[in-house]
Amino acid sequence: MALHYMRLGRYDAAISQFENSKDFEKKIHSIEFQVEPELTDAIYHHGRAHLELTNIKEANDVVNARKNTDHHKSNLLECDCLFEANEFEKSLACNYNHRNRVVQGHKSDDFQNRIDMIEEVMSKTIGNTSGDCLVNQRKTIPKLKNESEIDLRPLWKKRRDNNECDVVSYEDIDESPSESIKEQIHKDKNFNFLARKYLGPAAKNLFFLRELKKHNAFILPQATGTDHQLESITKSCHDKIMKNLQMIHARNPIYSSKKTISTHSDSKNCAKQRTFYMKMYLNRREAFKTLDLAKKLRNERKFNELLRYTDKILNEFYQMCTVKEFPRKFEFVTELCNNVALAYIDKLRIPSNLMMVPLNEKMAVLFNVKTMQENFDDVEYEFGNKSTFRDPLKVDTSFMRYREKKTHLEQRLTSTKYGIEKIYILHEIARHELINDKLDDCKVFARRCEERSCEIGSHIYKFLAILMQLKAEILATNIEKQSELLKKLEDAVIPLKKEELNQIIQIAVQINELQLEGKQTARNSL
């Protein structure tokens, strides 16, 4: 029955027939019956059924359980199991051992054909010279592997082994940096290419299984009883396909197949150059399209949409393009950041209700700065009024959004390549701190932005950085510090050559002088 199932391709049923046979289980562990030809054939078919289902470990265990080492098919199956497990060196040694036992004939040719195939695979994977290098470094590789291993033990155990003091402990927050979007997109792109090359149309099934594993879309509320079964089926199918994909890639790697695509060097270079020029053209066209849309949003005064769009471009498109594929990358980033700075400048206007506002609020109205009282929506609790109740255990979503945005900007700050982009991110962090009333942090980042803008010679961001410090001092009602910053603004506005900004600064200086006079009068009256 097992052989009948093998001919039909039903290998699961054949394996169950082999394992359920009591006589087979008794004889396979009996040494005196190991040399029977029928039992040796059964061991061979049992192992081949496991190998057809890619159960390599089980197939290897079944074949190694035999005592008759003269069975030709079983010997071939032993070599094939090692080859399928990507153990090329062990498979090569096994083929040589069995071939040396056979003098000549078709049996010797079978092993010789496998030897030639394994040597060809090894030449594709490690090349002609890498083998000698690996042999020479065989003592160094284990040391490097041990050094690269991460110690997952608790902190107190590491300090105990290093004889370090752990009397005063504090909470260690391990915030490992998340994988950058550039690396993530590259990995997804390489995986999609690998799957389509080796699996062909069947790659869609692998993509579908990966989405199921990632999002758990098969777990529905009306099917709670079958979610574990579906999850196990999805995982087993995904692991089996990935194992086959790795086995195929180990035999014919991508880098070796690329060399054999075009044997003629001129045609191969022409194809590479044609692909490179196509990427340059697409990047150039995408850059002009991006700049046109950013300028359109600025002209339409859609300020929030402009900030979101610029942040998206600098975080995705700009990170994916190399300087070789996009030579004007620095000019593109500079134009994009300066466009946002000009949008900030365009927001500065002399309000029509400035004369009707009290003197102590004129500066806040002139520069469109919200006061502390306007930022807080604090409702006094009244006993019996349910609408005024605030749950103290409720999660503060506004603080979570603030923390998430700040962490995102600080992570981007460490991976910036150009000074203008670093200035832009520093200004955005300062603006984010100002919105959330973190005045001290706002001043720190604004000063850093001012220093960096002086280093690279960006007059517009120097003006915006000083203006951000002035807004923080307006919220802090520090009139003396405001007068110092206004003097710096008068010097910073000169290179911009914009009369409207000069008028706004002069009005702010007059308001500040009136506030200083009022403060001095109040002191004298005391």
Image (tube, rainbow, N blue to C red):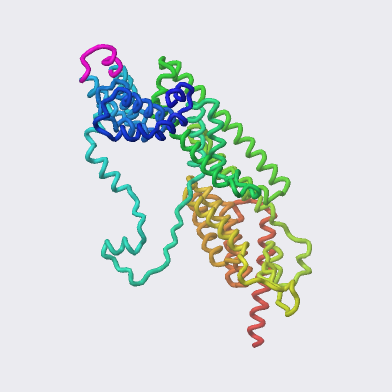
Q: Position of residue 188 (x, y in %)?
A: 51, 37
- Residue 338 visible in image: no
Residue 195 included in the magenta stretch of the image: no
Span of residues in magenta: 101-111
Q: Is residue 192 visible?
A: yes
Task: State the residue lying farthest toward the bottom.
Answer: 526
Main secondary structure found in the magenta portion: helix
Residue 137 left/right relative to 505: left
Which of these two is toward me, 98 or 511? 98
Quadrant placement of the C terminus: bottom right
Residue 501 vs residue 235: left or right?
A: right
Is 303 drawn above or below residue 331 in the view shown?
Answer: below
Which x, y percent locates residue 447? Answer: 52, 60
Residue 348 drawn at (x, y percent): 69, 56
Image quadrant in which you'd find residue 205: top right
The answer to which quarter of the image holds residue 290 is top right
The vertical placement of 395 against 151, above or below, is below
Taking the spot 30% from the left edge, 22% from the top edge, the residue there is 37
* Vertical placement of residue 143 versus 49, above or below: below
